[in-house]
Image (cartoon, rainbow, N blue to C red):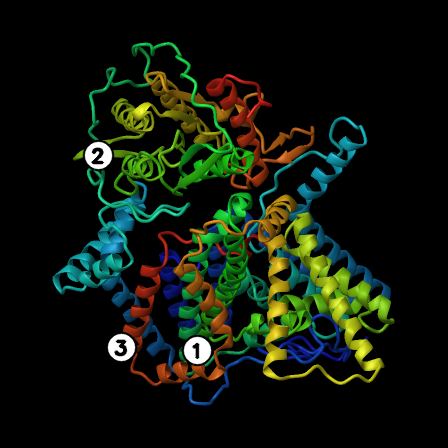
Amino acid sequence: MLFPTTDFAIFFVIVFLASWLLQPTPVRWKFFMIAASYVFYAWWDWHFIFLLAGCTAVSQLGAQLTYRARSEAAMRWAMGFTVAVLLGILFWFKYYLFLALNLDNGYHIVGGHGLVLPLLQVTLPVGISFFTFMAISYVVDVYRGTVVPASWLDYGVYLSFFPHLVAGPIVREAELMPQIRTRRDPRKVDFGRAAWLVLSGLFLKVVISSYLATQIVDPVFANPGQHSALEALFAIYGYAVQIFSDFAGYTNIAIGVALLLGFEFPQNFDSPYTSQSVQEFWRRWHMTLSRWLRDYVYIPLGGNRKGSRRTYINLMATMLLGGLWHGASWTFVMWGGLHGGALAWEHHRAERRKRLALPDPPHDFAHVALRRFVTFNFVCLGWVFFRAGSFATALSLLLRLIVGWFQSSPLVTWGVLVAIAFGIGVQYLPDDVGFRVQSMFSRMPAWVQGVAIGAGLFVISTLGPQGVAPFIYFRF
Amino acid sequence: MQRTLRPGETRTVVVGGGAEPVNGQVDGPASQRPQPGPRHRRGLGRRPEPAGKALIAIVIGFLVWLLLAAPALRRSAEASPFGARRTASIIVLAPFDALSRAVGLSKVDSAAESALGRNTGGNAQSNTGSNGPVGAAPSGVDATHPTLPPTRPHPHPSVSTQPGDVAPPPIVYPATVRKPTLAHPLTVLAIGDSIGIDLGYGLQRVMGNTGYYKVIVDGKISTGLARPDYFNWPAQLSLDLRRYHPDIVVALFGLNDPQAMRTGSAYLPTFSRSWFNEYSRRVDKILELGTSDGRHMVWASGPIVSDAHLRHDMNELNGVYRKQVRYYPNAYFFDTWRHTSSNGSYTAFLTGPNGNKFLARTGDGDHFTNDGEDYLGRIFLREFRARFLGRSPQQP
């Protein structure tokens, strides 16, 4: 089920009402929430509710076995086996075809005939990367002793809770489970913030993201060779804004929907295009994934504890895995490699500055603006590989930036420029702007709030295209 | 390893701000400094509200939205495929639409649509290219009425794929088109639904990049010839012909057309005899326009698809296209189905020019990957050169 649809609107009104009415009976509420979440997931393809249930059962069983193991070796084995099963599920759905095609083509190149592995087109279940990562972190946290296994019912709610189910944020057990176990107070709903998040998320997704996708990004990325340098440049900037609007928009809606049900999710975006370094970018972009990679990949690899060279290798390995997490394609590996390389380079420079006792970089306006400009353009370079269907397309697009000047650029319209400026500009807005609107909204009578919501929905549905494309991150 | 926690306890509870690792190590790509906390400041001015009040506001919000957007929502519902969902949507939206018109709120929607340059009379916006909204229908084409009277009499009686029909004339290969040069490339216009867009993108990359062809893609997702009330392709094509003056028109439709149709008050059940007659007439309309003024046209069949039911439907539609194309000397049938199947069966994998297997179809089993689009583009160009230019695949 997609958030910006009437199906979801009807579904949510029912769930909202039932969820608050069932607060006095927590067990019923939990059964209801699991059922609602499975309906939400089944709306896309009911077959895959068995996958979700299977992942829940495997990870919960693994967590129980890990917790009850009597020796360190048994714990390690139980945890490792469970994580391997979960990764195996993820691998099958997401990476099998990639492996089979590359093996078969490699075999063909060296003169082999026939297939090494059968070519099977496996349907990628929506959100599998998100809920398997949540399940893995749960089992590992139990192994580490930072959490104890939850009850089956609580864990069922945790893993399937529909606001985060298909595209995150990746919520830790320690963040969500205490909220699941606690009865929420129906007199204290953070409605002002929730309404702001949902409406702003809808606007970003339905209006900004969809507009840029259809007006410039899709046509240019489909065939870069026939477009001018200016169109190529603004298609790249357009995609940077599109993917931010799409994913941050989704996250805003998810956090807002959870708030309406009395739950608080961690923040996932914090004005990423204002970053002054790639390192800062990763503290602001998809924050729940980057901290997951930090805690379950980078630190277990040794983090920065084993010398500079090992730190660079760990950074690169983490980012390459992060790239592959987004999809089974060499272009995603390239994207991860670019970011891994940049992080290693920044780490090297910071170490050098420290070693030579050099002063901190200047913080005047010009230097800050320059660092932001360089970082944003580096991130955009990464997006070219992220969005392009192949290396050939990515290189063709980059080539247009060099040779495609002095051609007409009909796709670079005022609408496109305004949408890009808006998508970047909102990230520079002071925090207080949204907060003031939320505060004002929360003090209005219900009918005024309703009229404001209705007017907001009307503006969004009028400015948006007919039909809404699925969120980009659904396929990850 | 500590074991001091009891069920229900957690050691780290950080909501909204990012958890600190328990081992105290803070480093790595996301942790050179503590993660920024949430932007909101709890308790500073924002007032918690009762769930009941929130529900009332949400319901009022939906009602206000329904009133304001009722005309647009009803148009959207009417354009959806015939069935229970469409009927229910129209029934629910009808009173809101009536009320919206009665109190004058529908004017807000009309004004907004006009300000955005949209035509609320039937046509949706084009999905690709630099096309604006479709304005008034050209002469000879009724842009709003579902039935599309031909601009000139049919050169043949109505046809259907039912047994016992008159056999179509033999294939007449089209006359050659002018030789393209780098200075004067041939303009190719690719139209159609989402798969038509896939083909168009393949043509753009393969033909367009030779420099001998200028390929324009004007497709609209979720459209076809069955629902001119949703998107009127003859009107759009007429507009495109005036705008782009193509030498060649390439059309690919069908994926969204296996659905019931209406002509005036008549309801035509899917794949009934009357349905085939009407659908053939609509295909004729596109062919007439595409081949007018001595222009050449290529009608690409729908590709083989993974879903058995849809595959059967596409096969039926391809029969119509193949048959109708034969009545137009300047039209040519490009058999996408044959080129995308493996021994007559669906396959997601095709073999590229270097002998490597590649994934040609997306996960839905209908659309094409970039590699699949390019594959179609290459096959098309090869056939195009042979049929229209009378030359070998290597020649431009």
Q: Is residue A76 visible?
A: yes
- Above or below for A53 versus A312: above
Q: Amino acid at mark 3?
A: Trp
Q: Nearer the viewer, residue B348 or A70?
A: B348
Residue, x 22% and y 40% (percent of image)?
B137
- Which residue is tagged 2? B141
- Above or below for B369 versus A368: above
- Which residue is tagged 1? A193
- Which residue is tagged 3? A447
Q: Nearer the viewer, residue B29 or B299?
A: B299
Q: Amino acid at mark 2?
A: Val
Q: Residues within 10 Å of mark 2 (few under 14, many from 20)?
A: some
Instruction: Return the x and y of residue A304 as percentages of the image width and height.
Output: 81, 72
Subunit of label 3: A
Do dots 3 and 1 share one subunit?
A: yes
Q: Residues within 10 Å of mark 1 (few under 14, many from 20)?
A: many
- Mark nearest the camera among 2 and 3 is 2
